[in-house]
Image: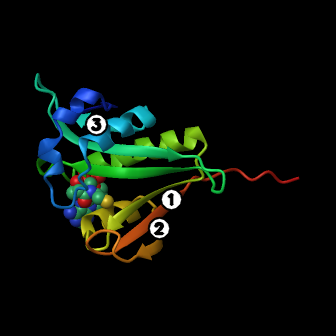
Amino acid sequence: MTSFREMRFDDLFKINSLVFDALTEVYSLTFFVKHLSQFPGLSQVAEAPGPDGRLMGYIFGQYQLKKTQEPYGHVAALTVSPEYRRLGLATALMDYFFTVSDLKGASYVNLFMRTSNQAAYQLYTSMGYAHRQTIADYYPESAYELRKYVPRHMEVQ
Ligand SMILES: CC(C)(COP(=O)(O)OP(=O)(O)OC[C@H]1O[C@@H](n2cnc3c(N)ncnc32)[C@H](O)[C@@H]1OP(=O)(O)O)[C@@H](O)C(=O)NCCC(=O)NCCS
């Protein structure tokens, strides 16, 4: 059975097969190490059953708390290995991150994606993420910023 758990530093040695995907954003080892230290509990992996503990996919999340903005969760990277796609893993990883962001007090979760990435667009819009803006040349191509707001109860006085 697939298990989901928090990403550990030693997982960084296992993600090579995942980051070679052309649509997966590749960051330096320094970025990943800094990210895991700065945002503990916000990155998760899906692990295949078996002694090798093969990684099926991962999400790197951030929580941004700035004076001038409402707090928000940010998906820095999401990828699922090609042989494990269309099984609901990305949906589960995104759901996890949305819930954690909500519990931390985020107003919304956002992400940036290549405008040509139709699979990602389908995934996010099917989960309620909506287009916020288009940014030219964010990648070697334009990017969409997508957002999903956390529903909050309104207090009526
Ligand atoms: C995009 C990606 C993360 C989706 O992962 P996944 O685990 O296959 O996604 P899910 O199984 O949770 O898919 C949920 C829904 O998303 C949509 N979807 C996912 N992949 C799709 C595809 N290739 N084409 C069309 N719709 C797709 C479907 O609506 C799907 O529901 P369905 O299978 O019932 O039709 C995966 O294809 C991937 O890692 N791609 C390369 C890296 C990447 O693009 N990351 C996102 C960068 S912003």
Q: Find disc 1 in the rendering and name its residue.
A: 148
| Res 121 label | none
Q: Which badge, 1 or 3, is on the more N-terminal residue?
A: 3
Report helix, strand or loop for mark 3. strand
Mark 1–mark 3 contact, CB under 8 Å? no
Residue, far front: 30
Q: In 3D space, how far apart are the residues under numbered discs 1 and 3 (Cα atoms)?
A: 22 Å
Callout 1–callout 2 Cβ contact below 8 Å: yes
The residue wearing badge 2 is 130
Q: Relative to residue 106, is residue 104 depicted above or below?
A: above
Identify the residue under disc 3: 45
Element marked by disc 2: strand
Task: Please tell me which residue is depicted at 25% across the width and 41% down the height of the picture.
Answer: 29
Q: What is the three-letter code of the residue carrying label 2?
A: Ala
Q: Observer-nearest residue: 94 or 35?
A: 35
Q: Earlier in the sequence, mark 3 or mark 2?
A: 3
Residue, x 33% and y 75% (percent of image)?
137
As rendered, which of 117 and 143 lies closer to the eye? 143
Q: From the image, which quarter does the N terminus lie in?
A: top left
The spot of residue 115 in percent (x, y) is 31, 73
**Secondary structure type for disc 1:** strand
